[in-house]
Image (cartoon, rainbow, N blue to C red):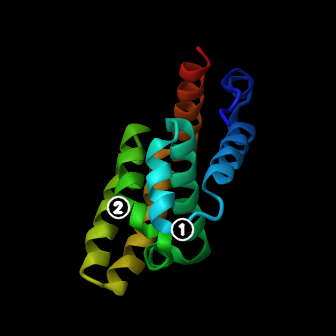
Amino acid sequence: MTPDWKLLAGLTGDDLQMALLTEADAILEGEPGPEEDRLLLTMPEPLRAMWIINWLDYEVCQGSLLAYFFNSHGRHAPLAAALLRRISAHRMADVVAKATASYERTSAEDLSQLTDRYWQAAKDDNWCSKLDAYLGEQVRLLAG
């Protein structure tokens, strides 16, 4: 089912984010990892972006970058870093990229320290406002 992009274009901020996340979750619900990954790459940008950034934010809020990487959604860290760059949250993207490299070396201590840097970068980048602007722009493009 295709989202009603014109209806979504009338939403802003948290309302738009929640609507996009609901749509993305409906597509990916119950899918195993490989199928989830395949479907994720076929989703329209605003749905994919919201889903990727939601899982990053959720996991880090719940337990740090360590939780993000030890849970299955950490496999999307390169996509999350690329998305953060697209919305001009470059400091956050740099931290996520460094965390990815640290995780690959299995250094939990590095991930703990990087979580502090992540939160400072989030504040410095004002990423929430940038994400809202990006999602709104992408939805308006699809709405025509």
Q: Residue type at mark 2?
A: Val
* Left or right of residue 110, residue 68 in this image: right
- Looking at the rendering, in which quadrant would you find the N terminus? top right
In the rendering, at what x and y percent does residue 48 appear? 52, 45
For numbered disc 2, what is the local secondary structure?
A: helix
Say how many tags the image has. Answer: 2
Above or below — where is 96 with respect to 79? Answer: below
Q: Residues within 10 Å of mark 2 (few under 14, many from 20)?
A: many
Q: Which residue is drawn at 71% across and 27% down?
A: 4
| Residue 134 position within the rendered picture, expressed as x and y whole percent measured from the top left | 52, 33
Question: Which quadrant of the structure image shows residue 133?
Answer: top right
| Tag 1 residue | 32
Quarter containing the C terminus: top right
Q: Nearest to the eye among marks 2 and 1: give it.
A: 1
Taking depth in this image into account, of 66 and 121 the one nearest to the observer is: 66
Would residue 94 be found to the left or right of residue 21 on screen?
A: left
Mark 2 — residue?
A: 95
Q: In this view, does 34 lie to the left or right of 46?
A: left
Q: Which of 99 and 125 is in front in this view?
A: 99
Front in this rendered view, residue 49 or 34: 34
Q: Which residue is drawn at 49% across and 62% down?
A: 119
Q: In this view, does 122 lie above or below 137?
A: below
From the viewer's perspective, is residue 60 above or below residue 2?
Answer: below
Specify whether 121 is left or right of 53: left
Mark 1 packing: few (<14 Cα in 10 Å), some, or many (20+)? few
Q: Which residue is drawn at 54% across and 68% down?
A: 32
Type of the residue with mark 1: Pro
Q: Distance between the residues labelled 2 and 1?
A: 28 Å
Where residue 30 sits: x, y (%)? 64, 65
Give the quadrant of residue 121: bottom left
Q: What element carries label 1?
A: loop
